[in-house]
Structure formats: C-alpha cells, structure tokens
Image (cartoon, rainbow, N blue to C red):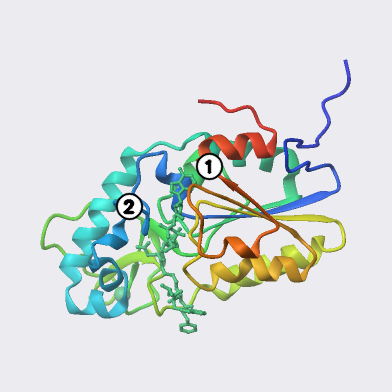
Amino acid sequence: MAPATSSVDGELGLGPDSALLVLTGAGVSAESGLPTYRGSGGLWRSHAFERLASPEGFHADPALVWRFYSERREAALRARPNAGHRALVEVERRMGQRFLLVTQNVDGLHRRAGSERLIEIHGRLLGTRCSRCRRPETTDETAYAEGTVPPCEQCGGLLRPAVVWFGEALDPAHLEAVDEFLERWRGGRLVFLAAGTSGAVWPAAGFVDLARARGAETWLVNAERADNAGRFDQVRQGPSGTLLPSLLGVSKTT
Ligand code: BV8
Ligand code: ZN
C-alpha cells in the first residue's frame, strides 16, 4: 500500500512543494444558513448595515448597534460549519506551515470547524472590547437584551463588538502576516484561493494583487460573478461547500 502522501491533490493540484493562501468571505458561511452582506437577502440590503457597522453608527445609537450584533451572535451560535469549512481544516492538517487561512468573516465558524492557522482580519462577532480603554478583548457570546449597552468594568466606557468597522484600520500585524507568508513561499508553487467573497471590501479585496505580485496562481470560487473576478487566473462558479472539497482534493463530508 503506497504511503499516504502529504500532498493535497484535487483540481488545484497542490503537491508537497506547494503553498496555499486562502481568503474567505461571507459566501463560505451561506450554506451554514448565515446571510451574506451583498447577495440577495444580504445584510447590506438593509442599508442600515453600513451605518450600523461604523464608529459613527455606534456613537449615534449604541443600543441599536448592540441589538444588531446580538441578533447576529445568536444566529452564528445556532449555525454549524459546513463542508467548505471542513475541507479547509483538512487541507491545513495536510499542508501545515505551507497553509494560511485569512477570513473576512466574523462569525467564528472557521475556528469552530477546527482551523488554527487562521487570521480573522475583520475581528470576531463573539468578542467584546472597550470603545475607550485598553481593556483586553474577551470572548463574549452574550446576546444583550433590547436597549442594553454593556459598560466597561475598568473605565465605565461603552463596550463594543470586537469587529473592525468601516473606516477603522485592520490590525497591522494581520496584514504583515499575509505579506510574510507570500514572501516566504514566493518562487515555489504559490497558490492564492479566494472563496465566497464579492471582492468589494478593501484592503482584503487587494490581496489577490499582493499574491500575483509574488508570482502566485490565483483562483476564485464564488456562487456569482464577483466584482473582481477578472483579476483571477481561474474562476469556478458554484457553492463553496461543494467546490472547495473537490478543488482541494478532500472528500466532501456532508
Ligand atoms: C480601512 C466587520 C482605512 C463588521 C466589515 C481602499 C483601501 C482601504 C480602505 C478602503 C478603500 N476603499 C474604500 C475603503 C473603505 C472601506 C471599504 O472597503 N469600503 C467598501 C464598501 C468600498 N474599507 C474599510 O473601511 C476598511 N478599513 O481600510 O480603513 C484606515 C487606515 C488607517 C487608519 C484608519 C482607517 C475596513 C473594512 C472592514 C469592514 N468590516 N465587517 C461586520 O461584519 O459587522 S466588512 C464586511 O464585508 C464583512 O466583514 C464581510 O466579510 C466583508 C466582505 O464582504 P464579503 O465577505 O465579500 O461578503 P459579500 O456578501 O459581499 O459577498 C459574498 C459573496 O459570496 C457573494 O459574491 C456571493 O455571490 C457569494 N456566495 C453566496 N453564497 C455562496 C457564495 N459563494 C460560494 N458559495 C456559496 N454558497
Ligand atoms: Zn474601558
């Protein structure tokens, strides 16, 4: 019996000398029942989203923003990872340090599926931090009751969801980690795979360009044609829960 190779085949044809950077968006959680932002029925449809997901929106009506995030926390906790999340955990197991997953999602499903080499660049829905002092961020699954705005135990300021809002800077360490990964594996078979993202939000939407600049082969898996599809070498249209296992050569566990 041939020894199990550490290679990950599938259409991406990842071998032992390959390195894979994956960027996921809300589409990867759609099959877990969580609404996307811009697709039909998306959160964005209620134009309130852009206002709610901003420091100005929080300042104007913190109770409304906490209601919005509390409802999303409840939905995220009810949801379960799908075959797409699990395929990414399996590929990480096989590729180790040659794999890195960067997600725009704040729903926590990649972590619940078992992903460890994971960067949550837009923060965590199930995290809470202070809007004023440097109180350490805590894991918080609380869905706060209507009208509640939790106060900071240390400074009395307003606690807020530990997500990155529009107009807020991403953590520089996260952006450096993406750059370092691409730099470290350039020259080998470097693959960049974006899945379930419309490519509308920056700077994540520009990661494909950073990868290409390091000679990466770029792939997009998306249910519909995404804004930035033209910037990828390969595009596969369809549900990530089906396409990720087959592209990554991982059996589709239902
Ligand atoms: C910043 C957390 C600067 C909160 C979110 C250029 C450079 C830098 C910034 C900008 C720039 N141009 C504009 C900006 C400003 C802004 C921006 O990008 N605006 C856009 C709207 C034009 N960017 C920012 O503000 C960023 N901050 O750069 O600050 C700065 C620098 C220094 C100092 C101060 C400031 C911050 C951006 C982060 C915002 N936070 N979320 C929350 O979620 O509540 S963004 C939000 O959108 C989510 O995180 C989400 O993940 C993200 C991206 O959306 P997608 O994941 O792509 O989801 P979407 O619904 O759009 O698409 C889903 C896709 O899946 C669809 O295409 C659909 O067809 C597909 N799909 C559906 N089902 C399936 C599927 N695919 C496969 N299978 C399926 N089953
Ligand atoms: Zn505080």
Towards the viewer: 139 or 229: 229
Residue 120: where, in percent of width, then height? 51, 59
> Which residue is the site of mark 1?
240
Residue 204: where, in percent of width, then height? 55, 67
Is the CB of mark 2 within 8 Å of ligand 1? no
Whichever of callouts 1 and 2 sits on the residue coming sooner in the sequence is 2
Left or right: where does residue 23 sit relative to residue 49?
Answer: right
Which residue extends farthest top? 1
Q: Amino acid at mark 2?
A: Ser
Is the CB of mark 1 within 8 Å of ligand 1? yes
Q: Please tell me which residue is depicted at 34% across the width and 49% down the height of the picture.
A: 35
Q: Dividing the picture into quarters, in which one does residue 9 lie?
A: top right
Q: Amino acid at mark 1?
A: Ser
> Which residue is the site of mark 2?
40
Residue 101: where, in percent of width, then height? 61, 53
Mark 1 and mark 2: Cα distance apart in space: 17 Å
- Locate ligand 1 by image quadrant: bottom left
